[in-house]
Amino acid sequence: MKKFSTSDANFERLIALIAKHMEVLKLNIFKPDYRLSLRTIVVFVAIGFMPILTAFSVGKYYEHLEIVVESFTQACTGMQVFIRSYFYLCQRDQCRQIVKEIRDQRILYGATEDDRMEQLFQRATKRILLLYRLLYALYCGSLFFLLGPIIMPDPRKASLPLAFRIPYLPPDENLLFWCLNYLHHIMLNVIGIHHLAPIDGVIILALINMCTRISALELMLKDLDVKIAESKWQQTEHLDSYLDRIIVLHTDMKRFAELINRTFEMHFFTVFGMICFIICMCLNMIAAQPRNSIYPLLLASVTQLLAICLFCNVLLIVNDRLPDCIYGIQWYRLTIAQQKKILFLLANSQPECVMSAVFMPVNMTSFVAVCRAAYSYFTILH
């Protein structure tokens, strides 16, 4: 039993890591008895305070266009955090269902009885754990904003990292007020990182798990092909149960893909909308003043969009291999009834497995389109 525990251990380590990051804001929705706490309420109050903070900051810096643009850019990040709070407040059950189905997949696909299947799931869980750690590290790169006063102090902002100041606490008049504003900026960064990273971590977990399930079906189809070759011509009735199992697992995989798309469709739409606006605002600032501290935010935003589009595109590519794998087996040696089942399986595997952002697909084509549009916009600014 020990050799079959590695992928489970890696998966539980991943879930524990995501839960640990959720726990920073007391938003650990993996707990069945999750309830709102005082820290959670403070977090949501801070998020809800963003529009007022933005309006006050814009009114304070209205004479400096680049600082106004910076305020709107950072407010847009706050808006993404506000909208995607829906994940913690209303999508707890869907999140737990996705995690439960991923936890149970080893038994469902027979990894406890097949070493090759077990190795497949082991590689997948290790890959997801590594990618989530990398994603979290990239998100933490936004903390470099806090070094703004040291690297490039801006007297117009009282040398604060962000273009925000708490109302009635002028940081340029009192050192204590400056420290309070600086602590407020630290809090905003911590909220943004530990609010968005777990959500995107669960999304990437679900997408890579879909790819793993497709790879598991391909492995089962190869085993079926070997069994067909060992059987006499059209005397394969004993393979009915194995073929039916493949069909059932493929149907369940499509249902799971629809669950993922239905759960995260609005998240994809929010990410596309907010990040496109952030990119445009950042480019405005860079065009007006090339030397500023907006580059980490631009990099973090583009990385977030790239990560989501990349893994959705990988799912699209992996799913496109499945029809070739189905057709590649020796289906002509099966009975007529079994050939009809293969025909239905082949037809059901051909539609693309595309994640949607309401109005557009989430893949690398959409990411490249956003980058090309951003480059054209930047060219026009110059």
Image (cartoon, rainbow, N blue to C red):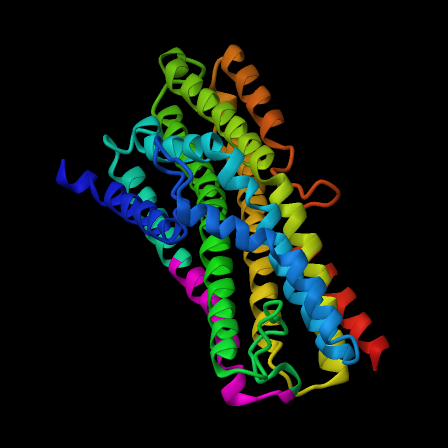
| Nearer the observer, 376 or 157 | 157
Q: Report x, y in % for residue 203.
A: 50, 45
At horizontal 52% and vertical 31% (from top left) the residue drawn is 326
Location of the C terminus by quadrant is bottom right
Within the magenta stretch, is there residue 149? Answer: yes
Residue at x 41% of width, y 56% of height: 132
Give the residue at the far right of this rendering: 380
Residue 363 visible in rendering:
no
Q: Is residue 140 left or right of residue 262?
A: left
Relative placement, left or right, of 177 versus 350 is left
Residue 235 percent location from the top left of the image: 40, 13
Q: Is residue 322 above or below residue 131?
A: above
Number of numbered discs: 0
Quadrant of residue 166 within the rendered picture? bottom right
Span of residues in magenta? 133-155
Q: Position of residue 35 (x, y in %)?
A: 39, 35
Q: Quadrant of the N terminus?
A: top left
